Each structure stands twice: as structure tokens, then as C-alpha cells.
């Protein structure tokens, strides 16, 4: 317990260590607007023509972030739940890079997917937090997220460091892959990344998540919606919430709410609507649809969005590049889950039935 320092739980400590973890993730990897990873320098991925991500749980949500970024850069990318790899993955060859995103590097489903992909002839890369882990040893190459050890079963800082590492990997691939189209605003994006640790600090200092957790404590269900980067953040927000509060929580793409889940929406089901930029009309219209059925709406994102004017509450994040805004929104949702679980007196660091690393398939 000494390792918790001034905090009540490891999860709380790990949420608050994200500014440091992210600084470590980024350090030394960007030079003159290009990205290098130790022995994977310029040209390392020149033969790659498509990417498949395999991951589980929180790592899967970080992989969704990476997949979206790669597709934006014109690189075909699939994001697969590792346990489904066998039947769900498209064909691979030696030009396919299969990226295992795994904090521990020991998740059996993810290791199995990597072995299957390698057996089919793909090139493999592990993106992991643990030096010398099985994934790092077995994959052709490894990139470390450098988040530092994570004790709480519910992943927090490793998600943020994974997402940033995958964003950096996207830049490396966009430069190496011949048909890729590096983003026009890459310089602005990488400059904004340098501010990310400071922005996380600001969120931690100003968050109203504790008050909102209390306000919505007696709800029946908690829904999380978002589009684009906001979609993966909504899924992660719901996963975190159910893992440690044991309350019913679900995440959806904003536009999917009306295709079924709306039947569950009542005044006792707050909707946390995640957005990363001002052009996300769908999240606003679908949130308003739920609001008209009585659901309280919490806007989760920067000030500059039409949802803020109509929402019942706002979990604010500083203005930044849209690629990073989702990670700040996720910090707000981590705090929300943490405080809700604390009010319910749950064993936050060791939720029932869950393990930090699942080593069976
Ligand atoms: C377990 C943990 C999750 C984690 C997942 C993947 O289910 O409870 O928190 O996201 O495994 O773990 P990995 O180590 O592969 O990232």
C-alpha cells in the first residue's frame, strides 16, 4: 500500500500520473517533425501496405484510435478483437503489419492472434508497456509505451500512452508507406502533442467529475456516445464505468443510439456525449433526441461545440487538436468512473471477477 503515496487507490494515483507518463511516452521520439522509435527509424516500414490491429479490452479501444488515424493517412487498417482474429481478419501477406496492442504483453487472446497472423505470413509488431513480455519477445519488433508500471486492474494511464504511441506510429508509417498521405496539419498536431501533458494536468485540477458522479449516483444505466475518435472514447468510458462501479454502462457510436438503445433511455439514464471538435453534428442531434426522452446530457469535450449550449452539464477539456481532445475527454471519464465507484464503496483496484492480465483464452 505504501506505493499509493498520497492517494486512496492505485487507480487514482495512476490517473494522476498521466502527465508524467505521457511525457515519457513522447520523449525523444519526435525530431524535426518526424517520428523515430529507437531501432525502428526512417524507412523501417517501407514494405508495409496495410495494417491490422489486434487487442482486447481497453487496449482494443486504443487500437481503434490508431486505426482511425491510419485510415486518415490513407493506409488501410483493420481493428480486430484479438479473440476473433481467427475468423474475422482479412487476408494477410508479408506486407501486412499486424500490430498487437497489449499493456501487459501477456494476454492469451492477443498472443494467439499474433501467432496466427505470423503463421499466415504477416509481419508483427508489439506495442506494449512491459519490456521483455511475451508479445515483445515473439513479435518481429516491439515499441514500448513507457507508461511505467500499472497496478490497478482497470487500465488508465496505459490507455493514454498507447493511444499517443499509436498516433506517433501513424506518423512513422505515413512517412514510410509509399502510397500514404501524411496529414496536412501534422506540424500543428505534433506541436499540440507537446502540450498534452499540461492539458491533462489542467483537466485533473479543474474536473467536476466528482460532483457529477454524486449527482447521477442513483441512475439505472449510464450511456456513453461519440463519433470518430469520440466513439472509441465512449466505448472506453463505458468499459471503465462498468468494470469498477458494477453499474450498467454501455457505449455507442452517436448515430447508433436511435437504432435500439434508445428504448432503454429514461430520466434515470444519463448520456455522456464525447466530442473532439466543433463539427460533430451527429453527437448533438442524437444527444438531443435522448434529452427529449428525459435523459440528462453531459457534454464531454472542449467549449467550442453546439452541444455545450443545450447539455445539462459539461465536463470541460482545454481546446487542442482534435486528435488529442478525445484523450482529454477520456481523463474526465476515468475520474467519473473512479468517483462513482468510490461513492459505491467498490474495491476499485481489484474489481470482482477481473484480472489485470488474462492469460487464458
Ligand atoms: C484484461 C484487463 C483489461 C485489459 C485487457 C487487455 O481484460 O482487465 O483492463 O484492457 O485485459 O490487457 P492487455 O494487457 O493485453 O492490454
Image: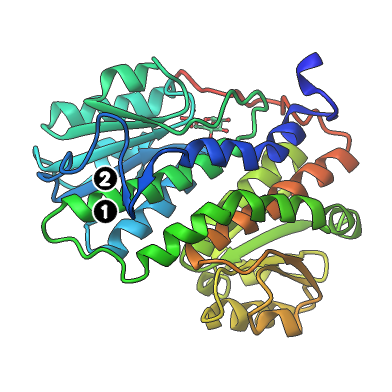
Residue visible at 25% across and 29% down? Answer: 39
Q: CB of residue at label 1: within 8 Å of ligand 1?
A: no
For the N terminus, which image quadrant?
Answer: top right
Residue visible at 67% across and 38% down? Answer: 243
Judging from the image, what secondary structure is the residue with disc 1 in? strand
For the C terminus, which image quadrant?
Answer: top left
In the displayed structure, 90 sits above or below 361; it is below
**241 vs 134, nearest the viewer:** 134
Residue visible at 51% across and 66% down? Answer: 321
Q: Can residue 1 be seen by looking at this rendering?
A: no
Residue to which mark 2 is pinned:
52
- Residue 77 tag number: 1
- Residue 210 tag number: none
274 to the left or right of 25: right
Q: CA distance from mark 2 to mark 1?
A: 6 Å
Q: Can residue 151 be seen by looking at this rendering?
A: yes
Q: CB of residue at label 2: within 8 Å of ligand 1?
A: no
**345 vs 141, nearest the viewer:** 141
In the displayed structure, 236 sits above or below 27; it is below
Of the numbered discs 2 and 1, the one sitting upstream in the chain is 2
Position in image of residue 38 (x %, y %) = 31, 31
Q: Categorize mark 1 by other alpha carbons within 10 Å: few (<14), some (14-19), many (20+).
A: many
81 to the left or right of 50: right
Residue visible at 21% across and 54% down? Answer: 175
Q: Are marks 2 and 1 in contact (CB under 8 Å)?
A: yes
Judging from the image, what secondary structure is the residue with disc 2 in? strand
30 to the left or right of 315: left
Quarter of the view holding residue 9: top right
Amino acid at each position: 500500500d505504501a506505493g499509493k503515496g498520497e492517494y486512496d487507490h492505485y487507480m487514482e494515483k495512476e490517473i494522476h500520473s498521466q502527465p508524467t507518463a505521457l511525457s515519457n511516452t513522447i520523449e525523444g521520439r519526435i525530431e524535426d517533425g518526424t517520428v523515430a522509435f529507437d531501432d525502428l527509424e526512417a524507412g523501417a516500414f517501407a514494405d508495409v501496405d496495410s495494417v491490422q490491429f489486434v487487442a482486447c479490452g481497453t487496449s482494443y479501444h486504443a487500437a481503434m484510435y490508431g486505426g482511425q488515424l491510419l485510415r486518415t493517412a490513407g493506409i488501410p487498417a483493420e481493428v480486430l478483437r484479438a479473440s476473433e482474429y481467427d475468423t474475422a481478419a482479412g487476408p494477410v501477406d508479408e506486407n501486412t503489419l499486424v500490430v498487437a496492442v497489449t499493456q501487459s504483453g501477456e494476454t492469451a487472446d492477443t498472443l494467439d492472434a499474433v501467432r496466427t497472423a505470423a503463421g499466415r505470413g504477416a509481419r508483427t509488431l508489439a506495442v506494449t508497456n512491459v519490456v521483455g513480455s511475451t508479445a515483445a519477445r515473439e513479435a518481429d519488433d516491439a515499441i514500448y509505451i513507457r507508461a511505467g508500471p500499472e497496478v490497478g486492474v482497470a487500465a488508465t494511464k496505459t490507455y493514454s500512452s498507447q493511444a499517443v504511441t499509436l498516433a506517433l506510429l501513424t506518423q512513422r508509417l505515413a512517412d514510410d508507406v509509399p502510397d500514404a498521405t501524411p496529414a496536412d496539419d501534422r506540424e500543428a498536431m505534433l506541436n499540440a502533442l507537446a502540450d498534452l501533458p499540461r492539458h491533462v494536468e489542467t483537466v485533473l485540477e479543474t474536473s467536476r467529475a466528482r460532483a457529477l458522479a454524486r449527482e447521477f449516483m442513483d441512475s439505472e444505466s449510464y450511456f456513453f456516445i461519440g463519433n470518430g475518435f469520440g466513439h472509441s472514447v465512449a466505448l472506453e468510458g463505458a468499459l471503465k464505468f462498468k468494470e469498477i462501479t458494477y453499474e450498467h454502462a454501455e457505449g455507442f457510436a452517436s448515430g447508433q443510439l436511435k437504432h435500439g438503445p434508445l428504448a432503454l433511455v429514461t430520466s434515470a439514464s444519463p448520456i455522456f456525449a464525447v466530442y473532439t471538435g466543433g463539427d460533430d453534428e451527429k453527437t448533438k442531434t442524437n444527444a438531443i433526441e435522448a434529452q427529449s426522452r428525459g435523459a440528462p446530457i453531459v457534454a464531454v469535450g472542449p467549449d467550442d461545440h453546439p452541444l455545450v449550449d443545450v447539455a445539462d452539464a459539461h465536463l470541460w477539456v482545454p481546446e487542442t487538436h482534435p486528435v488529442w481532445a478525445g484523450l482529454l475527454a477520456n481523463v474526465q471519464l476515468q475520474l467519473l468512473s473512479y468517483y462513482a465507484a468510490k461513492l459505491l464503496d467498490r474495491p476499485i483496484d481489484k474489481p470482482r471477477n477481473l484480472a489485470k492480465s488474462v492469460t487464458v483464452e
